[in-house]
Amino acid sequence: MDTPDFILDEDIVYLNHAAVSPWPRRTAAGVQAFADENARLGSRHYPRWLTVEESLRERLRGLINAPAADDIALLKNTSEALSVVAFGLDWQAGDNVVSSNEEFPSNRIVWQALGERGVTLKEADLQAGPTPEDALLAQVDEHTRLIAISSVQYASGLQLDLRRIGEFCREHAILFCIDAIQSLGAVRFDAQAVHADFVMADGHKWMLGPEGLALFYCRAELRDRLRLHQYGWHMTDAYTDFDRRDWQPADSARRFECGSPNMLGIHALEASLALLQERGMAWVESRVLAHARCLMAAITKAPELQLITDPSPGRHAGIVTFRHRTRDNAAVFAELTRHGVMCAQRGGGIRFSPHYYTPQAQGLRAVALAAGGRD
C-alpha cells in the first residue's frame, strides 16, 4: 500500500499498530539520512542533533499536554519508566498498589517485584463492577499508595475513564501512574486533565516510531520523591562540564537519563511525531475511531464472530479484538497471516489495530477472511 505517508508492500494489510508499527516514509528517510551523515561526517553536526532532541521533547510535551518540555525524559522503554517509579518511591511494608487483571506484563511484574519490600499488588477484575472504574476503585483501601493502570487495555481494547480515576486519586492523596502506550499517537491524551502523576509509553506502537525509545513524564513536584538508581554523566546539573567534580541531579526530567541519548531513535521518533502533529491529533483520533467502529460493525454482523472489545462510545480506542465462535482462533490467525494480514493473538481472540491511514476496505476484507476463511 503506497500512500503519501507510508510505503507498505501491496500484499500487506497492516492491522497491528498495537504491537509494532511500520515507520512512515519520512521516518525511514530521516533514519537513512542520519546514517549517511554519520558515515560521512561522524559527529561533526552534533549540535544540530541536539536541536532534534529538543524538538522531540517539545513534541512529546505537546502530545500529552505536559506543562513543560523539562517534564519529559527519554528512556529506553515503558518497562524502564515503570521501574523508575516503582523503585524510586519510598515504600513502607503494608503499602499496596492497585491495578487490574488485564494489564500487560510490564505493568504487573514491576509492581509484583515490590513484594520483597512488603508491598502488595491488588488486581481488580474490571468486569466485576457496574463500571471498570468502580471495580478498580473498590480495591483501594487505607494502605493504597498508587494506582497503576493502562489507558487502554492491550488485549481487550478497553479504554478507561482516566479523569474519574485521576480525580479520585487527588481526593485521596494517591499517586496515579498511567501506561499510555496504547493511547499516545492514536487518541488525544491530556496528562493535566486526568491528573496524572506519571505517564510512560514506548514509541513503537501508535506513535509510529522505533523500539528502544520511550516517553516518561513525571509531575515536577514529584521528581525529588523518586530515588535514583541509575547514575551517569547525562543526568547531572552541569552535564557538559566534564571536569566538574561536584554535581547534583538535574532539576529537569533529564535526571532520569543516566547516559548518552539514543540519537538514531530520537531522529526517527521526532520525524514520526512531526507527521502525527501535522495531521493533527484530533483528526488522527477521528480516523482511528472511525476505522475501529467500522471493524466492530462488520464483526458484529458476522454470525461466525464474537466481538470482545466494548463498542460503547468512550470505551475503546484503536484496538478491536474478537474471536471465532466455532473455529480455533490460532488457525484463523494463521490463515490471516498467510493472506498478509498483520494482526495479533491477544485476550483469547484476535486483535486488529488499524491506524489513521489504514484503508477501511482492507479491514473489511480481513474481517471477511476471519469469518469465512476465504478471500
Image: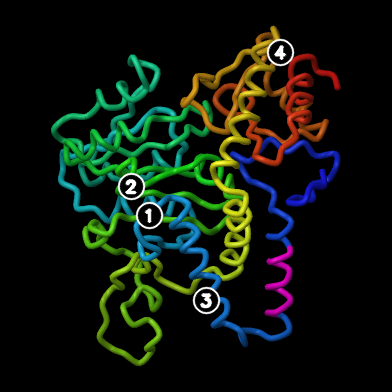
Q: Residue at x 37, y 47 (%)?
A: 191
The Cα atoms of the two marked residues, 3 and 2, are separated by: 27 Å
- Kindly identify which residue carries mark 4: 327
Q: Marks 2 and 1: CB-CB under 8 Å?
A: yes
198 versus 298 height, above or below: below
Can residue 33 be found in the magenta stretch? yes
Amino acid residing under circle 1? Ala
Classed neighbour count for the residue bearing mark 1: other residues with Cα under 10 Å, few (<14), some (14–19), many (≥20) = many
Q: Residue at x 25, y 41 (%)?
A: 146
93 versus 307 height, above or below: below
User: Position of 152 compared to 242: left or right?
Assistant: right
Task: Give whichever of discs 3 and 4 has the lower sequence position.
Answer: 3
152 versus 372 height, above or below: below
- Kindly identify which residue carries mark 1: 66
Q: Nearer the viewer, residue 110 or 185?
A: 185
Amino acid residing under circle 3? Leu
Can residue 81 be found in the magenta stretch? no
Q: Marks 3 and 2: CB-CB under 8 Å?
A: no
Classed neighbour count for the residue bearing mark 2: other residues with Cα under 10 Å, few (<14), some (14–19), many (≥20) = some
Q: Residue at x 44, y 29 (%)?
A: 102
Q: Position of residue 241 (x, y in %)?
A: 37, 88
Q: Marks 1 and 4: CB-CB under 8 Å?
A: no
Task: Give whichever of discs 3 and 2 has the lower sequence position.
Answer: 3
Name the quarter where the N terminus is drawn: top right
Q: Position of residue 109 (x, y in %)?
A: 39, 41
Residue numbers of the magenta segment? 29-38
Q: Marks 4 and 2: CB-CB under 8 Å?
A: no
Amino acid residing under circle 2? Gln
